Amino acid sequence: VLWLGGFALQRIHWTHPVGKPLTVSLLQGDIPQELKWRDDAVRWSLATYAKLTLNSTGRLIVMPETALPLFYRDVPREYLEGLAAYAKSIGSDVLIGLPEAETAGNTRYFNSVLSFGASPTQVYRKYHLVPFGEYIPLKPLFGWVIKVLNIPLADFSRGAKFQRPLRVSGQAVAVDICYEDVFGEEVIRQLPQATLLVNVSDDAWFGDSIAPWQHLQFSQTRALETGRYMLRATNTGVTAIIDQHGRVLKHMPEFKAAALNGVAQGFAGETPYVRFGNGPVLAVLFAGLALVVLRGRRVASR
């Protein structure tokens, strides 16, 4: 019944195209993880992404997570203004992954994506943080881990739980950062308003392993269950364009500094998952558990 039901539901077009097809340029800088956060390598990162951006022609240009290894306030103004001016000159928007520092009151840090170009500047701040990688749980007990392991930027704060899609390049873009796209119930918080999904990641930590490809499969699942294109921009791979059926249309080889150019389509509408999330699955699981418990009691009472 589940198989037949799934097959039947898959044949229904839950979403429909909205807006014109969108040219995209997804940037992959291939900055080695052991160099990325070193002071003497910052110029390399900035130069790499400036070159890739200024040679891109997509209406939406996307850099990966923390592509610029500087706080937003510390990035040279002329650098950002140059990228924004170029994007504006070709009618484009560029999404840039970089950390932010908010100094009003207690200083807080965010893993963010900011937009620059033809549309007004907007920001998405990562909500689902990696424990011991981006924040230290029970900090009074485990705060020493940051110093011992020398983890860069391991004290981020959460962004807001509910954030609006970024209005860029004629689309409403739901951004998620790194492994946030593993959690479908969090991705759909920006839907059905969002017409396009974007994931920015840095999976360089995993080296030449199967982990980046597994992460790509999570992105494919998010595209399929929401009925929307997913654009992935990563530091070392796997940078890819995924359609609304979860199929990888194009991807770039790992460990190569280049731009993946292609076309994406915005989609509107609600799939069952966008509307109900994990609710139906959890209901079935709890119902099954209840039946097992009831059956066990009946057997025990005989």
Image: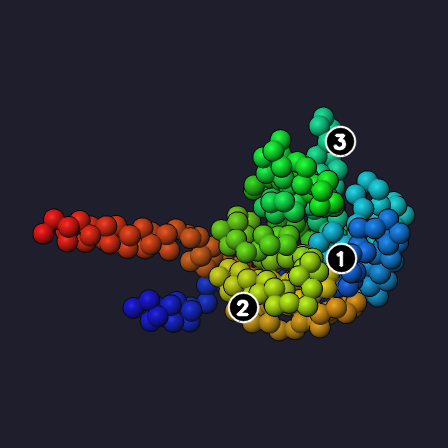
Q: Nearer the viewer, mark 2 or mark 1?
A: 1
Chain-order first, disc 2 or disc 1: 1
Dot 3 corresponds to which residue? 103
Badge 2 density bin: few <14, some 14–19, many ≥20, Cα 10 Å: many
Q: Nearer the viewer, residue 230 or 135?
A: 135
Chain-order first, disc 2 or disc 3: 3
Q: Amino acid at mark 3?
A: Thr
Query: Tags 1 and 3 in contact by the CB under 8 Å rule?
Result: no
Question: Where 127 sits versus 61, above or below?
Answer: above
Q: Quadrant of residue 266?
A: bottom right
Could you tell me how far apart the alpha carbons at marks 2 and 1 are, in whole angstroms? 29 Å
Image location of residue 276, percent across then percent down: 41, 52
- Mark yes or no: residue 185 visible: yes
Badge 3 density bin: few <14, some 14–19, many ≥20, Cα 10 Å: few
Dot 1 corresponds to which residue? 33
Asked whether, in this view, residue 156 is left or right of residue 271, the answer is right
At mark 2, the secondary structure is loop
